[in-house]
Every structure is written in structure tokens, then in C-alpha cells.
Image: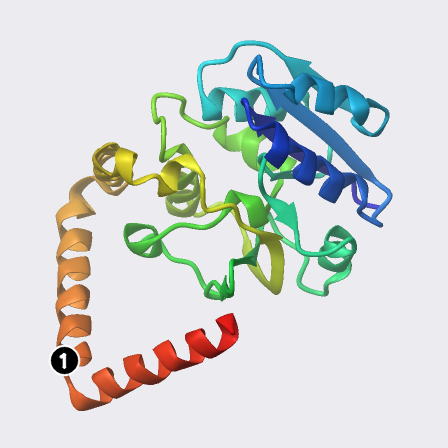
Amino acid sequence: MLSISIITINYNNAEGLQKTIQSVVEQTYNNIEYILIDGGSTDGSVEVIKTYQNSITKWVSEKDNGIYNAMNKGIARATGNYLLFLNSGDIFTSKNTVQDCVSNHNFKGDIIYGDYQFKNREKIYPDVISPYYFVKSSLPHQSTFFHQSVFEKMGSFDETYKISADRAFYLKCCVSNIFTWQHIKYPVTLFDLEGLSNNPNHFKKKQEEDERLWKENFGVFYDDYKKMLAQEQEINRLKKATINGITNRFFKKIKSLWKIR
């Protein structure tokens, strides 16, 4: 049976942490190594951890140097065949999530990514991933199972990035062309939209880091990928301006409002 290391990082988010821990300890899959890295919280998070400490394999509460430093601490402590990062505030979509994923016929390869849900919607990712995909978007570490060998070969997250280190890591792995990627059409997590990368106050910093990771990984092809993105955005803008585009947006809006009701 495959062993799965689930890594949760937290800092002063006791309420979200309790939800995340509860989601993990309720999993029906019985070969989970649960690692919790707390950044020296002062809001009662440590008390929450101690409440569940019999269900937590390893935990530490100490000052760290940010999100990715904490995630790297988790990597260093993990011994599972696959690692998944479920940070405080994020939860699995059901008690059977890990069991369903591991038993899925597509659970194979080095980087196995699923989908996620948020509020009244869901995000479904493409089956095929290319370097260009990471110019437009990224994958969710909350729904990705990384084989241990990925970190052995590529190292850990680059801590000089404060917001986009996971995107930089995905792209670095993609352009290396040494790993197999597999999509599982399954909503793995309910995503917490309050994370750092979704905070509008950090938008400029995120843009700067994204530009840097593209330049570092694409090299001489950087300008070509940027041109491709600009062309695709212009084509999409023109499509939206057509009658069909306006009609489609109208019905999508109606559909979303109906779901909320």
C-alpha cells in the first residue's frame, strides 16, 4: 500500500487549522503520514494541534521564513511515497478523498494532479500540461500528489519566491521533461480563497515573481511565450465581443445565479 505524506503549514489561523486537521484525520485511507508545520503561532493554533496530536505523525511550532520555508520543512520530514500540501484552511472534499485518489486507475506517475472546488464552483484542469500552460496559469499544490523522487531530483521550493514558488517549481519540473504527469478528474480539495496568492494587496509582487520565473525557466523562448499569450488574449477578447460570446456569458451568469439559489 502506498504511503501518503500530507503536509499542513499554518500561522495564526487556528480556526482554519482545526478544519484542515479534522479533514485529514477523518480520511478513510489508513496509510497517511500527517506532518504539521506551524510558524510559531500565538492565536491558539498550538492548542488545536495538541488536541489532535495523537493523530499527527510529526509536528513543530517555531518561527520560519515564510510559506515555502515551512513547506520545505515538511518535505524534509516526509517519508511517504507521495506528498500533498494541504495548508490550513483547505479541506478534502470528502472522508474518502485520499482513498478514491489512490485507488483511481490514473493514479500513476510522478506528478498526479486533481481538480478542486471553491464556493459554488469548481476548477477542472487539462489532461495534458505543457510549459506554455504555466504562462497562463498554474496547478494547485492542494490537489497535487508529488512522488518523493520529484523533490529528490529537483530539490525543494525556491524560498527567494514569496508568492510564486509553487508555480516556479511546477514549471521547473515541466521544462526538465523528466517526469510523467497525470490528471485525475476528481475534486480533491475545497480551496480556501483567502490565501496569499489570491490577496489583491500582493498582486504587484506576484506579477514580478511570475515574470522572473518565466525568464529563468524559458530563457531565450521567454519573448515567444509572452507573444503567444498576448495573441491568445486578443483572440479571446474578440470572441467575447461577438453575439455568441455575449450570449454565452449571459447564460453562464444565469446558470451561476441559479446554483447560488
Seen from the viewer's position, the closer of residues 123 and 159 is 123
Residue 27 coordinates in the image, percent (x, y): 80, 47
Q: Nearer the viewer, residue 150 or 235?
A: 235
In this rendering, position of residue 161 left or right of residue 53: left
Q: How many marks?
A: 1
The quarter holding residue 42 reads top right
Type of the residue with mark 1: Ala
Q: Position of residue 212 (x, y in %)?
A: 23, 34
* Left or right for 136, reference 29: left
* Residue appearing at x 24%, y 32% in the figure: 205
Residue 254 falls in image quadrant: bottom left
Q: What SS does tag 1 mark?
A: loop
Q: Nearer the viewer, residue 257 or 248?
A: 257
Note whether residue 76 is visible. no
Q: Quadrant of residue 204?
A: top left
User: Against 60, is 246 above or below?
Assistant: below
Q: Residue at x 25, y 41 (%)?
A: 214
Q: Is residue 26 above or below residue 105?
A: above
**Is residue 233 visible from the viewing direction of this image?**
yes
Q: Position of residue 227 (x, y in %)?
A: 12, 57
| For residue 67, side relative to residue 82 (left or right) | left
Give the residue drawn at x 59%, y 10%: 62
Residue at x 52% of width, y 43% of height: 141
Label 1 packing within 10 angstroms: few (<14), some (14-19), many (20+):
few
Residue that extends furthest to the top in the rendered view of this protein: 63
Does residue 238 sit above or below 55 in this rendering? Answer: below
Disc 1 designates what residue? 241
